[in-house]
Image (spheres, rainbow, N blue to C red):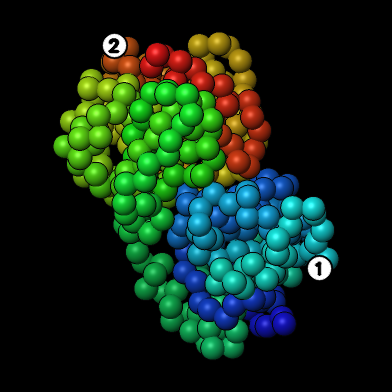
């Protein structure tokens, strides 16, 4: 059943449409996703925690939800906005239609608005705090809830909401290296790809101490993607500082930013972030251009990379740093997602190359 619903941006712009599934008031940063497919992966991507996700493609949900493509055990977005949701999805792997799944996952969802107009506002203004209300009761509170939320600047708590609280072991079949994954909001595809390449994994909480990590006796460390501002995780940064030089390390997305901070660089907030599967990145070592999957609102300031770090990747849209490596230590990182899910597979070789250096 459709219900009255609206999205209110902090600048006063309002979009009225219809709500589906779940009556609630959601607060989050309004952002947009440019992929034509991959909505199941996007809605369950931990890096979207605390965000109201707008899909730019006008029809979403035509192949339903399979469960196999999910990147987390539950939906991670604060809310969702779509032009139109497919009324009769069909796919051999479908377990449930998108509308029913969104209701089951308690994701407030707005449909029927001009998403082109909304994306234009976000593109011109940049990422902006917003409230999404579904149902009469939520609509009555939308303005009073947004005002105090719009004044906030912190993203503290987002990583804790999606990251593991306990150590989780993932065995591989061929006796490969033991890799500790520091979970800041790791996607299932990263665990899957590393395991498929032969790594034996210990997935540990982002707040794990140096001593707790050393006790696992790893051969190497991966720092995962995740949501929010990397400077909100000072304890993780300090732990990484204490591990520099002890093990080979590889950072992905938020992990890229955390490693850069641990090495002495700085980060900044992008105007509207990089999200979707079509970001062109140049591999400076190969001279090749990769089409890559991104999901982040912050970036490493390439001008602040200390002399011991060498830039290895650059974004061809805005020139931001997309990767670095340490000149003398086995440390490297990339801003994008090599595992994609969703997105192109141009960068999947990076995990295999990095693991090969451990043998």
Q: Which SS class for mark 2?
A: loop
- Which quadrant does the C terminus fall into? top left
Q: Is residue 288 left or right of residue 82?
A: left
335 or 303: nearer the viewer: 335
Q: Which residue is mark 1?
A: 87
Q: Residue at x 68, y 71 (%)?
A: 100
- Which quadrant does the N terminus fall into? bottom right
Q: Which SS class for mark 1?
A: loop
Q: Residue at x 58, y 52 (%)?
A: 70
The mark tally for this picture is 2
Q: Which quadrant would residue 293 be assigned to in this image?
A: top right
Give the CA separation, mark 2 to mark 1.
56 Å
Q: Residue 234: give x, y in percent of width and height.
A: 23, 44
Near mark 2 (Cα within 10 A), the count class, few <14, some 14-19 or many ≥20, is few
Numbered tag placed on residue 44 in the rendering: none
Near mark 1 (Cα within 10 A), the count class, few <14, some 14-19 or many ≥20, is some
Q: Residue 166: give x, y in percent of width and height.
A: 31, 51
Q: Residue at x 55, y 72 (%)?
A: 106
Q: Which residue is mark 2?
A: 328
- From the viewer's perspective, is residue 307 above or below residue 339? above
């Amino acid at each position: 059943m459709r219900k009255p619903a609206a999205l209110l941006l902090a600048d006063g712009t309002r979009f009225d449409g219809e709500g589906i599934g779940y009556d609630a008031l959601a607060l989050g940063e309004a952002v947009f996703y440019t992929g034509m497919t991959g909505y199941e992966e996007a809605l369950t991507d931990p890096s979207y925690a605390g965000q109201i996700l707008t899909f730019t493609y006008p029809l979403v949900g035509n192949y339903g939800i399979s469960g196999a493509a999910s990147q987390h055990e539950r939906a991670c977005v604060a809310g969702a906005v779509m032009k139109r949701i497919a009324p009769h999805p069909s796919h051999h792997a479908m377990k449930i239609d998108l509308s029913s799944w969104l209701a089951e996952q308690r994701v407030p969802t707005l449909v029927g608005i001009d998403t082109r107009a909304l994306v234009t506002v976000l593109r011109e203004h940049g990422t902006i705090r917003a409230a999404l209300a579904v149902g009469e009761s939520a609509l009555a509170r939308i303005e009073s809830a947004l005002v105090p939320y719009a004044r906030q600047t912190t993203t503290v708590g987002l990583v804790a909401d999606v990251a593991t609280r306990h150590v989780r072991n993932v065995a591989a079949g061929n006796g490969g290296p033991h890799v500790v994954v520091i979970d800041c909001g790791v996607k299932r595809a990263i665990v899957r790809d590393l395991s498929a390449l032969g790594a034996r994994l210990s997935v540990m909480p982002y707040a794990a101490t140096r001593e707790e990590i050393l006790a696992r006796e790893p051969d190497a460390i991966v720092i995962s993607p995740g949501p929010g501002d990397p400077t909100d995780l000072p304890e993780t940064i300090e732990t990484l500082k204490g591990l520099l030089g002890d093990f080979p390390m590889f950072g992905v997305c938020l992990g890229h930013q955390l490693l850069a901070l641990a090495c002495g660089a700085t980060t900044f907030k992008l105007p509207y972030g990089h999200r979707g599967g079509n970001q062109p990145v140049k591999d400076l070592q190969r001279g090749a251009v990769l089409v890559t999957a991104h999901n982040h609102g912050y970036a490493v300031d390439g001008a602040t990379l200390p002399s011991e770090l060498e830039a290895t990747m650059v974004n061809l849209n805005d020139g931001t740093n997309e990767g670095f490596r340490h000149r003398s230590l086995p440390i490297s990182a990339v801003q994008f997602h090599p595992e994609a899910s969703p997105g192109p597979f141009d960068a999947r070789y990076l995990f295999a190359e990095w693991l090969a250096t451990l043998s």
